[in-house]
Image (spheres, rainbow, N blue to C red):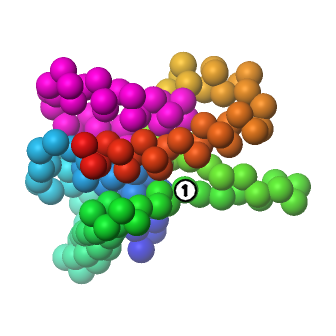
Amino acid sequence: VLDNYLIRYGHDDSVLDSSELDGFFAALACAPDTIMPSRWMPAIWGGEAYSPEWQSQAEFTEFSHAAFTLYNHVMHCLNEDDFQALFLEREVEGNTYTIVDEWCEGFLRGFNLWGPLSAADAALTEECIQPLKLFATDAGFEKLDVMNKDEVVARQQLIEPGIRRLFQW
């Protein structure tokens, strides 16, 4: 349901898929202050000006229900210390690869809604999100280009522990 509406109403500056939305919600869960839906719902679409013109109230209700279900799931899993990011997988020539880029991009999109941080919060946050930046920034992509497969996998495996640590902080 989420992917259907994100594809139908999305564009280059909106959340692309449910993996990115999962990362976005993980960032909201980790935020030091609660970010209200009135602020984050438009951010899914790239801002208020890009919010969809829903064809019906039923469409809006279906999307909202699915989005809040995922939001609550992410919150619950982080609170229960049972969090697993919704990473994608791709099969290429018989090999399965974990794709974390969209999830990381979503987290950074949600992180941008946080606002100013104290020095202690900023230092720990930066440490925890470093692995994400590798998969969601131009500078990170340049570093990935020179890594071998095992190095990339090792960096991917740092994402979830960093998010759990940040949430607990």
Q: Nearer the viewer, residue 95 or 44?
A: 95
In the image, residue 82 sits, relative to residue 125, either above or below, namely below
Q: Is residue 5 visible?
A: no
Decide: few, some or many residues near mark 1? Use Cα within 10 Å; few <14, some 14-19, many ≥20: some
Q: Nearer the viewer, residue 33 or 145?
A: 33
Q: In the rendered view, does 26 fall on the left or right side of 18?
A: left
Mark 1: which secondary structure?
A: loop
Q: In the rendered view, does 100 fall on the left or right side of 130?
A: right
Which quadrant of the structure image shows residue 82?
Answer: bottom left
What is the magenta range? 107-136
- Quadrant location of the C terminus in the rendered image: top left
Which quadrant of the structure image shows residue 57?
Answer: bottom left
Q: Amino acid at mark 1?
A: Phe
- Picture coordinates of residue 50, whole percent (x, y): 26, 46
Residue occupied by mark 1: 87
Q: Nearer the viewer, residue 165 or 84?
A: 165
- Picture coordinates of residue 23, whole percent (x, y): 40, 51
In the image, residue 139 sits, relative to residue 33, either above or below, namely above
- Picture coordinates of residue 17, whole percent (x, y): 47, 57
Q: Residue at x 31, y 32 (%)?
A: 125
Q: In the rendered structure, does residue 133 fall within the stretch colored magenta?
A: yes
